[in-house]
Image (cartoon, rainbow, N blue to C red):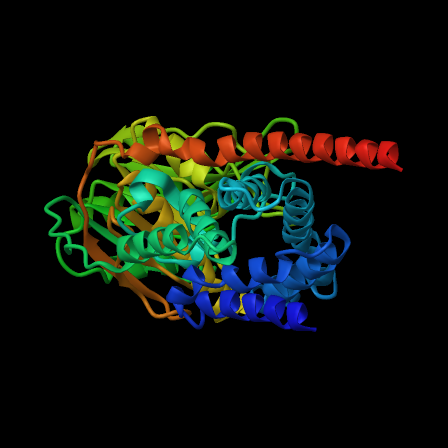
């Protein structure tokens, strides 16, 4: 019973670290009761504890999935829960054959991070929400090791405390806390002024009208995902109206969500950037939303020249994944202008959870990001992952903010991103190691008998 209570405590602490609660510091300690519950238990019992933790965590944070998928949401909770279940069984199996050696806390952190990265970036139904790294706000370590590196530090620290290595555990969790919560300087951008429009499926004319309400000198506009469909490039009247908006306001470009129809009948969810002289660049959504008719996935993350500088226009769900923004930055993007869509019916909790992920992408890559979301959260994020400004959820409006054009690349963008893939490889090696030791011990036991 005590192990069950510890498992539920771990899930509860994790749930409270995410929106709408925002009790972020709990993400630093949430793994401690989970690993304590698994410490010294059998692999069979660990399976049940891991499943209980996963189901409680994902049903408690992602319950808004029921608004979208109905009863099918239960299957999604089970699928996501399989990863902490496998983590728990692997931890217990490794401890059974190897004991709690000096390196064991690091092995626990590797296994967690390897499974987290696989679930988030490589799995067929990849879904990078609700992890220890994203439960914390971006901090000083984010541009070095990203969210997966933060998950590794937090879980390794928790494991060290449980395995009676208090100095190591306290040191790791203290570093994570200081890196997250020490004050950071506020930016004073001197670059272009961007106007991001928030409105859900209001029609082309309404987006134009809202754009004209932007106050001050505007350099660029961003409209939400699916703002103009069918393909805006095929409608000369709409292109002309956009160019008139640019000419009247003195802006130099506008990025909006549209689509590309292909000869074979398929289509792509496309962000189109228009200037006074025509199309400046496009981006096809790389990560269409699972189970939605969201277009064929794109394969490239272009960064293209505009009057403002080199930009990338990754779309909505693209920015949930660490790999997409990283590739855009590596390709030369100096600024991200992001059309996004979160339907109002998906709940405020969904909107707030989703909005946090773009903050991590900005901090990992050291870039300003301007997100124009259909019903929120429309936001401007600085290169440290701090939300500079935002609009209230669900209310149509225009958010105007100044940003900077930046070209440096972070350590994370250069090499730090490898932490996740390396943990996947190391997890596979630990699984082989565990299997070999299990067989040897079983063989030795049979010989002794």
Residue 366 image-quadrant placement: top left
Q: Give the farthest residue toward the front.
A: 448
For residue 125, above or below residue 85: above
Position of 297 with respect to 375 (left or right) is right
Q: Is residue 235 visible?
A: no
**Residue toward you, 258 or 138:** 138
Residue at the spot 47% in from the left edge and 59% down from the top edge: 201
**Residue 50 picture location, percent across and down:** 67, 57
**Residue 446 picture location, percent across and down:** 87, 35
Quadrant location, the N terminus? bottom right
**Residue 7 picture location, percent across and down:** 62, 66
Residue 77 image-quadrant placement: bottom right
Residue at the spot 40% in from the left edge and 63% down from the top edge: 376
For residue 384, above or below residue 216: above
Q: Is residue 293 visible?
A: yes
Residue at the spot 63% in from the left edge and 57% down from the top edge: 38
């Amino acid at each position: 019973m005590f192990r069950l209570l510890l498992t539920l405590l771990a899930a509860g602490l994790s749930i409270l670290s995410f929106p709408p609660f925002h009790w972020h510091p709990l993400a630093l300690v949430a793994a401690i009761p989970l690993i304590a519950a698994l410490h010294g238990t059998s692999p069979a019992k660990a399976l049940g504890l891991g499943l209980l933790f996963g189901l409680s965590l994902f049903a408690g944070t992602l319950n808004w999935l029921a608004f979208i998928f109905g009863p099918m949401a239960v299957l999604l909770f089970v699928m996501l829960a399989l990863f902490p279940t496998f983590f728990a069984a692997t931890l217990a199996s490794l401890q059974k054959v190897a004991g709690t050696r000096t390196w064991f806390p690091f092995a626990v952190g590797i296994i967690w991070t390897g499974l987290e990265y696989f679930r988030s970036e490589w799995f067929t139904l990849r879904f990078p929400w609700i992890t220890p790294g994203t439960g914390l706000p971006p901090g000083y370590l984010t541009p070095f090791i990203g969210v997966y590196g933060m998950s590794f530090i937090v879980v390794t620290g928790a494991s060290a405390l449980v395995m009676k290595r208090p100095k190591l555990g306290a040191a790791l969790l203290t570093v994570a806390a200081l890196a997250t919560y020490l004050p950071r300087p506020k930016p004073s951008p001197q670059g272009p002024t961007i106007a991001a429009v928030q409105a859900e499926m209001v029609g082309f004319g309404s987006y134009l009208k809202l754009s004209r309400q932007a106050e001050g000198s505007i350099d660029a506009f961003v409209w939400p995902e699916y703002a103009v469909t069918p393909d805006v490039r095929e409608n000369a009247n709409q292109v002309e109206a956009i160019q008139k908006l640019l000419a009247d306001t003195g802006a130099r470009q506008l990025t909006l969500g549209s689509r590309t129809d292909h000869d074979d009948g398929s289509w792509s969810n496309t962000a189109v950037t228009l200037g006074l002289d025509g199309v400046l660049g496009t981006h096809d959504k790389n990560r269409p939303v699972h189970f939605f008719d969201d277009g064929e996935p794109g394969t490239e993350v272009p960064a293209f020249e505009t009057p403002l500088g080199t930009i990338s226009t990754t779309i909505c769900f693209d920015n949930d994944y660490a790999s997409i923004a990283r590739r855009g930055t590596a390709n030369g993007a100096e600024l991200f202008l992001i059309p996004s869509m979160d339907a109002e019916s998906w709940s405020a909790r969904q909107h707030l959870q989703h909005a946090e992920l773009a903050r991590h992408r900005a901090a990992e890559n050291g870039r300003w990001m301007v997100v124009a979301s259909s019903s929120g959260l429309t936001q401007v994020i600085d290169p440290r992952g701090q939300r500079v400004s935002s609009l209230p959820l669900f209310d149509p409006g225009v958010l105007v903010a100044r940003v900077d054009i930046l070209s440096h690349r972070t350590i994370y963008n250069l090499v730090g991103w490898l932490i996740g893939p390396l943990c996947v490889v190391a997890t596979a090696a630990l699984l082989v190691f565990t299997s070999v030791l299990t067989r040897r011990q079983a063989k030795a036991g049979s010989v002794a008998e």
